Amino acid sequence: MIGEYNVVARIRCDYVSKFGIPRQSGIISESEAVIIFEPEYRSREAIRGLEDYNYVWLIWLFSENIGKGFRPTVRPPRLGGNSRVGVFATRSPFRPNPVGLSSVRLTGIDHDAAEGPLLHVAGADLMDGTPIIDIKPYIPYADIHTDATGGFSDTVRNHSLKVGEGLELLRNMPEKKAEVLKRLLEQDPRPAYHDEPGRVYAFEYAEYHVEFCVEDDIVRVLRIQSIKDSGQ
């Protein structure tokens, strides 16, 4: 239990730090994760009927932001980190209540695993270990709004980088992980207020340490090393 919330599950995924996590759910659909229920909620009865849906909503906590206070305005990354917008017009983690909402694809349910039942999902944007406080089915007739407008996010949704040099380094990784890492780099994981050509950035993805730099919207992969091999 965290605060007034009962943690029902946690996610197991390859995003081991905040740096590099997709900015929204569903953007990197190839990214796979597993939802593991807390012991008191490991009940087949609790998920009966969920197999009839192929998308679910995850309601979760920005656990690393608890207690960091309320900010009425924030600087959305996709506005370059310079323009301020009201927090309720964004999905910033700095909120009065540190609650996140993600729509993910339900790819399977494993009832027989030792920690089961397990939910296998794709397209999540949560850090490994994130506490989940509720899971709800995605209902198309109610949740799809074809006339919805996207505010400032519509004007920047196509922003992406091109991965140029260093692609050969990805060949030493499993194919699926390499594809997800390439997509992460294309989405520009740098802090929005950083635009220093040639500056080296580093983050951890799965069991790998990754270093890269960006110049003229081109990503140059500098290093990919197994954390196990490096002794980190």
Image: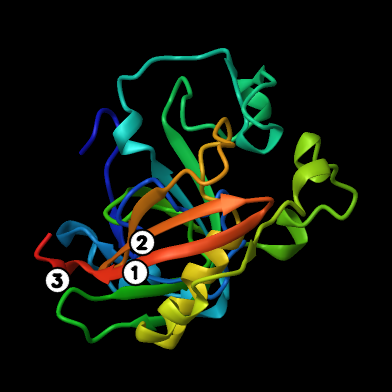
Q: Nearer the viewer, residue 146 or 13?
A: 13
Q: Nearer the viewer, residue 150 or 228?
A: 228
Q: Residue at label 1?
A: 224
> Where is residue 120 drawn, in percent x and y?
40, 75
Q: CA distance from mark 3 to mark 2?
A: 13 Å
Q: 122 left or right of 173?
A: right
> Where is residue 184 drawn, in percent x and y?
52, 61
> Where is residue 107 drawn, in percent x and y?
49, 80
Q: Residue at label 3?
A: 228
Q: CA distance from mark 3 to mark 1?
A: 12 Å
Q: Residue furthest right?
A: 147
Q: Earlier in the sequence, mark 1 or mark 2?
A: 2
Q: Secondary structure at mark 3?
A: helix
**What's the amino acid at mark 3?**
Lys
Residue, x 35% and y 53% (percent of image)?
A: 203
Report if residue 171 is visible in the image.
yes
Q: Are marks 1 and 2 in contact (CB under 8 Å)?
A: yes
Q: Residue at label 2?
A: 210
**What's the amino acid at mark 2?**
Val
> Where is residue 169 drawn, in percent x and y?
41, 77
The local crowd at label 2, few if under 14, some if 14 to 19, many if 20 or more residues have their Cα within 10 Å, is some
Q: Residue furthest front?
A: 198
Q: Nearer the viewer, mark 3 or mark 1?
A: 1
